[in-house]
Structures are given as structure tokens and as C-alpha cells.
């Protein structure tokens, strides 16, 4: 099995004036391709910091983060942008669609920054929209959609560049329980199709869907546990 | 690559359409600036063309001396006879003493009534020499102009201007007919082609009109009419004695015109204690026109410059607000793979779209300059005649000419303003930390 993401002894310090905040203090784990990992922890545990590092939005203070074997810690600002554009699919808590663009245009944004703007790519965007159930709403604006629909658009957008993993930050934090269930089912489905998913959440119900749970506490990994609930869930759906 | 720019452009338009009114107001400064640039160049061009026209009609190497009736308070000679103006002696003195003069043409002109059959025309009777035709660029339509032999023999021949001929002889060929001037009879030997009026000279504001002229040999005029003209006015009889109405001197070279004019003025001043003559140097008109034009250019340039800077600052201000407002969008775009230069491009394209919009509308409105300036002049003439009267003649009579090269220039300025004033907000957007920007509410 290929290692998609490898985090090796990563630390991250922030400087608040003269004070040093040690947000991560040596974190190591691997995420193989096809894995479904939930990163959990209380606020202040270093969850968001780890998310930013995995999302190539920031450099670690020390240690390595390998994406497809490339060390993010040494990448330039432009290279980080390229990595984000080509290897990572972001899903945010507040959906983060661009308000003046339509559904289709929003899905296209990552391609725009990779200069992939052909009719063929556009057709693929439409397919993705159809896959998340918004094939009929291609020309709607985000404000015309419900929260769940917006998050579906965001998931389609995260898939459009065929990333090595989807990085979802509290993807159901702004959704009601029914929609949460729908979105999580979509994630399950994507994982079954072979997509690697890294989920950052503090909701146990959501974390329980993942195959493995990484718990953070005070900038360190408290535990990495395989999640039996997830497997049984998957078995259930298969037998159904 | 082209697709990318088209997309960026579309995106820019979309983002600007989020606040259409705001975008329109922002454009206003650039719009005024660009329109002023077009106007300034059009008016400048109009003035210099007008000046060129004047010089051409008067001759760049000419010096024109005219007799002017002095204001009544300056008249010293009492009695019936008013004597003023340049004399035959002046003419001889100038021609014999100044070597740079290659040609001198003298005329004597009078207001007269011409009649043929029952028809009458009031016009200008011009006693002249054959050279007069060349000096004022008269063109002969039929027959011939006055010739040297006519002067020697004191012939009672005349040549009609186009307007005179048309009114006296609407249905006949005037050549060979005899017209009456005062109590004298003259044979028509030629008719001129129509001629446009030329610039006013020698203190007279009115342009010279050639349409109702009659030309006769100057010697004939002296012999038959003489220097003294009687006019009946308000019951009393007035008499004026004028020897020459105008002398046109032609100077050998353009460089010598100004110095020759100085000598001419000095020579005349010695023999004329009163200001009963005027010296016009067309070349000086050129100089005047240049100064007028310069003043206009500076004035309009100032307006253009100020409104472009103000417009640019307006754009910058709005873009800074937009960047703050769209911090989150910037964060999203950065997270989805936009590099700093992608963000810079996006916001620069937006400002350039704004300023270009101002540029295009400014250019379109600039095109209305000739129409609008006519309207303004017309309104000024009616509403503020005093102000209108105080304007230099060249400003009143010129017509703005759109300079073709001013269009790309104005467009370039608009784009440049967009880039210059858009760069700072765009850089500010690009330098945001993506994590902070994403967290922005």
C-alpha cells in the first residue's frame, strides 16, 4: 500500500510577542492511500495547527511532512500553492464557496489555478456536480442553496483536482443532524471508491465514521486507534 | 493562456457587478480625466490649425500696415477736413530704405455703392495694383485682373468679386458691361472666384470679407475720386483725406520678418504723431496663437491631471475596501491553490477593467468636443457677452479637431492609472496570510 501522507516528528511553534506557543510537539503518523482518518481533540490540542500543516497552508517549525514523497517543510510559498491546487481537496466547516460564482464555476476554481480550463474539464465538473446530487443546479449561486447543498458543492470542488487526500475541517459543524448524516454518507461512499480522507473534528459521532482515530492532546498524539464501529458500519452497508 | 485572461476578465466584471453603483461612481474621475485629455488635445489642435489658417491667408512673410481713423478725442485738426492714415510718402520711404522688403503692395479702399441697371450693391471699392491678386490670393474666374498697363493709362476698368458679380448680374455675363460707381462708369474686365473671408487685421475685429468687392487700378481711383471723401452725417458734411488704406510688405525671409517689422514701426512712428495706422505681423499671430494654445493646454492639462489623480485615488480607495471586504474569498482562493501573483492578477484586472471603462466612456464623450464647445461658445455669447468678448479672437473662432493619436494616448493613460493605483491594493490582497484570511468573518 502506498503512503499518501507521512508526518514525521513535526513540531510547530508560534511566537506571540516574546512568548513561544508550542502548538505541536513532535507528531508522527502515516496516512496510507485509501485510508479514512479522523483527527480529534479538544480545542487547543493542536488540531487546527496540524490541519494547516497537512493543508500546505503553513510550514512546520521542524520535522517532515511528505506528500507523495515530497517534503512540504522545504517547499516555497509558490510550491505550496501548487501542492494545494493539485494534491489536496479542502472541505471547510463554513463551506467557503465564492458567492459571486455559480455552482459550476465554484467547482472549477482549483482547475483555474492549475490552468486546466478545457471543455473536457468542464464536462468533468458537471459530472462531479451530478455525482453529489446537484446536476440540476449548475447555474445557481451559493446563496440559493441550502447548507447541505453548499457542502456538496464544496465536496465536488475538493474532488475536481483528483487529490491524494481530502482534508475536511469540521465538515458538518454548520449542518443539522439529517444533513450531517447525508454528508457523512457521501464521505463513506467516497472512501469506498478509494479516496483518502482526513477528517478533523471534535464531534465523536462524526469521528466514529472513520477507520482510524488520531487523538491529540497538548500538541502530542495521545492515541491512534482502529475504529471497529466504522468497519461494522461498512460491513452493514455492504450486506445491505 | 488566453483562456485564463478571459476567465480573469469575466471574474473581474462579475465581482464589479456586485456593486454596480459603486463601480460607476469610481469610474467618474477617470472618465473626466480622459475626456479632458481628448478635449485638451482637440482644442490645442483647433487653435494651432486656426493660427495656421490665418497665417496662410495673410502670408507668413507679410507685414500689413493699415490706416486707422483715430478716436475723435485725438483729432487735432479742426474744421471740416479730417486727415489721417498712411501716405504715398510713407510708402516711398519704406520701399526705398528697407532692403529686406521684396515687394510692396498698396491699396486704397472705400465703401461705395455699385449699380448696374436697376440693381445696386453696397460694397468695398479697392484701388489696387496687379500684385494685390497674389497677395490676397484672388483667383480669376473669367476675364482678367487689373494689369500694369491699366494703371499707366488710368483705365476705367474694374474686376468684380464673385458676390458682387452675382448680385449685379444674376442673369448676364458681366464681362464687357459697364457699371456705375458714384457718378463714374467702369467697364468690367474680369470676375473673381468666391473667396473665404480671412482673419481680421489691424485692430479691426471683423474678418475681411471679399465677397462684395470691386477692384480698379489705384491710379484711376486717385485721379477720378481723389484722396478726399465727403460723407453726409447727421445733417453735417464731413470730409476725410486718406491717401492709402493699406500697404502689404513682403519680406525676403521669415527670419527677417520681426526685425523688418520693428524698422517699419520705427519709421512710421517718426512721421505719425497720432496713432492713425496699425501694423499687423501675421507671424506675431502665430506667436500669440502659440501662447494661447499653451495656456489652454496647461489649463486643461491641469484639469486632466488632477481628475486622473483623484480618480486613481478613488479607485485605490474602493479597491482597498473591496480587498478587506473579500478577505475570505482571498483566503479560499489561496487555499484552493492561488499563488500570490494569481491574486495580484485578479485584483489588477478588476482595477484595469474599472479604469478602462472610464477611459472608453471618456473617449466617447471626448468625441463630442467639437459639438459641445460650439454649444458652450454659443451659450457664452448669449448669457455672458462680456466674457465672450474678452476671449481672444482665435479662441472664439477656432473649431476643436480630434487628434487621432489622442485616442490611444487617453486609453493608455486610463490603463496606466488602473495599474498604478491598483497595484497597492492588489499586493495587499496577495500578501494576506491564507490562514488568517480563511478565518476572517
Image (cartoon, helix red, strand yellow):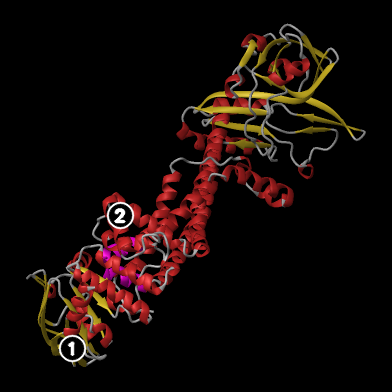
Seen at 63% across and 11% down, the residue is B147
Q: Farthest left residue?
A: A1
Give the chain letter at badge 1. A
Find numbered disc 1 in the image and state the secondary structure of the residue it sits on.
strand
Please state if B209 lies on the left or on the right of B428 as rendered.
right
Residue located beneath label 2 in the image: A122
Q: Of marks 1 and 2, which one's residue comes earlier in the chain?
A: 2
Q: Which residues are magenta?
A: B328-347
- Residue B330 is inside the magenta segment: yes
Please state if A212 lies on the left or on the right of B344 as rendered.
left
- Residue B266 is inside the magenta segment: no
Query: Residue A38: image x %, image y %?
Result: 20, 82
Rounded to the nearest angstrom, the CA distance separating label 1 from label 2 is: 39 Å
Residue B294 seen in the figure: no
Seen at 52% across and 56% down, the residue is B32
Q: Quadrant of residue B338?
A: bottom left
Position above or below: A21 against B141: below
Q: Farthest top residue?
A: B176
Q: Nearer the viewer, residue B254 or B161?
A: B161
Position above or below: A163 against A200: above
Give the chain letter at badge 2. A
Residue located beneath label 1 in the image: A215
- Within 10 Å of disc 2 (Cα), the crowding (few <14, some 14-19, many 20+) is some
Position above or below: B29 against A190: above
Q: Nearer the viewer, residue A141 or A33?
A: A33
Q: Farthest right residue?
A: B235
Residue B342 seen in the figure: yes
Amino acid at each position: 500500500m502506498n503512503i499518501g501522507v507521512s508526518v514525521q516528528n513535526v513540531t510547530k511553534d508560534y511566537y506571540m510577542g516574546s512568548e513561544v506557543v508550542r502548538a505541536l510537539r513532535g507528531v508522527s503518523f502515516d496516512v496510507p492511500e485509501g485510508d479514512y482518518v479522523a483527527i480529534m481533540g479538544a480545542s487547543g490540542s493542536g488540531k487546527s495547527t496540524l490541519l494547516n500543516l497537512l493543508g500546505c497552508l503553513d510550514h512546520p517549525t521542524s520535522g517532515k511532512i511528505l506528500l507523495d514523497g515530497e517534503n512540504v517543510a522545504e517547499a516555497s510559498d509558490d510550491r505550496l500553492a501548487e501542492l494545494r491546487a493539485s494534491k489536496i481537496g479542502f472541505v471547510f466547516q463554513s463551506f467557503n464557496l465564492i458567492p459571486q460564482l455559480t455552482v459550476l464555476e465554484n467547482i472549477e476554481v482549483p482547475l483555474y489555478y492549475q490552468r486546466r480550463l478545457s471543455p473536457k474539464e468542464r464536462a468533468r465538473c458537471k459530472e462531479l456536480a451530478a455525482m453529489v446530487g446537484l446536476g440540476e443546479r449548475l447555474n445557481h449561486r451559493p446563496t440559493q442553496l441550502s447548507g447541505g447543498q453548499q457542502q456538496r458543492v464544496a465536496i465536488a470542488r475538493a474532488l475536481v483536482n483528483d487529490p491524494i487526500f481530502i482534508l475536511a475541517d469540521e465538515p458538518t459543524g454548520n449542518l443539522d443532524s439529517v444533513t450531517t448524516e447525508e454528508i457523512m454518507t457521501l464521505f463513506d461512499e467516497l472512501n469506498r471508491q478509494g479516496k483518502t480522507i482526513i477528517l478533523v473534528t471534535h464531534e465523536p459521532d462524526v469521528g466514529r465514521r472513520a477507520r482510524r482515530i488520531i487523538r491529540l492532546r497538548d500538541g502530542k498524539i495521545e492515541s491512534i486507534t482502529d475504529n471497529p464501529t466504522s468497519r461494522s458500519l461498512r460491513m452493514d452497508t455492504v450486506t445491505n | 493562456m488566453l483562456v485564463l485572461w478571459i476567465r480573469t476578465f469575466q471574474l473581474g466584471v462579475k465581482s464589479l457587478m456586485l456593486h454596480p453603483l459603486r463601480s460607476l461612481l469610481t469610474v467618474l474621475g477617470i472618465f473626466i480625466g480622459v475626456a479632458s485629455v481628448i478635449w485638451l488635445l482637440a482644442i490645442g489642435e483647433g487653435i494651432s490649425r486656426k493660427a495656421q489658417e490665418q497665417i496662410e491667408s495673410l502670408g507668413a512673410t507679410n507685414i500689413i500696415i493699415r490706416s486707422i481713423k483715430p478716436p475723435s478725442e485725438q483729432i487735432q485738426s479742426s474744421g471740416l477736413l479730417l486727415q489721417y492714415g498712411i501716405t504715398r510718402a510713407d510708402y516711398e520711404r519704406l520701399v526705398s530704405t528697407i532692403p529686406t522688403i521684396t515687394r510692396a503692395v498698396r491699396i486704397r479702399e472705400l465703401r461705395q455703392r455699385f449699380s448696374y441697371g436697376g440693381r445696386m450693391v453696397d460694397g468695398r471699392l479697392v484701388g489696387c495694383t496687379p500684385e494685390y491678386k497674389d497677395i490676397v490670393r484672388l483667383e480669376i474666374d473669367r476675364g482678367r485682373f487689373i494689369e500694369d498697363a491699366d494703371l499707366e493709362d488710368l483705365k476705367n476698368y474694374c474686376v468684380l468679386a464673385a458676390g458682387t458679380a452675382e448680385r449685379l448680374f444674376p442673369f448676364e455675363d458681366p464681362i464687357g458691361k459697364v457699371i456705375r460707381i458714384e457718378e463714374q462708369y467702369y467697364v468690367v474686365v474680369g470676375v473673381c472666384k468666391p473667396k473665404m473671408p480671412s482673419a481680421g487685421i489691424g485692430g479691426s475685429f471683423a474678418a475681411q470679407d471679399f465677397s462684395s468687392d470691386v477692384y480698379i487700378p489705384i491710379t484711376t481711383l486717385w485721379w477720378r475720386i481723389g484722396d478726399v471723401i465727403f460723407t453726409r452725417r447727421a445733417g453735417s458734411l464731413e470730409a476725410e483725406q486718406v491717401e492709402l488704406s493699406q500697404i502689404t510688405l513682403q519680406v525676403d525671409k521669415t527670419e527677417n520678418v520681426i526685425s523688418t517689422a520693428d524698422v517699419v514701426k520705427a519709421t512710421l512712428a517718426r512721421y505719425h504723431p497720432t496713432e492713425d495706422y496699425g501694423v499687423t505681423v501675421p507671424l506675431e499671430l502665430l506667436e500669440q496663437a502659440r501662447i494661447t494654445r499653451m495656456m489652454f493646454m496647461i489649463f486643461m492639462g491641469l484639469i486632466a491631471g488632477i481628475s486622473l489623480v483623484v480618480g486613481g485615488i478613488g479607485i485605490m480607495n474602493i479597491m482597498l475596501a473591496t480587498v478587506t471586504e473579500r478577505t475570505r474569498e482571498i483566503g479560499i482562493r489561496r487555499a484552493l491553490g492561488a499563488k500570490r501573483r494569481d491574486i495580484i492578477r485578479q485584483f489588477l484586472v478588476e482595477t484595469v477593467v474599472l479604469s478602462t471603462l472610464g477611459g472608453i466612456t471618456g473617449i466617447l464623450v471626448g468625441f463630442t468636443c467639437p459639438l459641445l464647445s460650439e454649444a458652450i461658445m454659443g451659450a457664452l455669447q448669449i448669457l455672458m457677452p462680456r466674457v465672450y468678448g474678452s476671449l481672444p479672437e482665435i479662441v472664439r473662432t477656432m473649431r476643436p479637431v480630434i487628434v487621432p493619436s489622442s485616442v490611444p494616448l487617453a486609453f493608455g493613460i486610463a490603463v496606466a492609472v488602473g495599474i498604478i493605483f491598483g497595484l497597492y491594493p492588489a499586493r495587499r490582497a496577495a500578501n494576506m496570510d491564507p490562514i488568517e484570511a480563511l478565518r476572517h468573518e
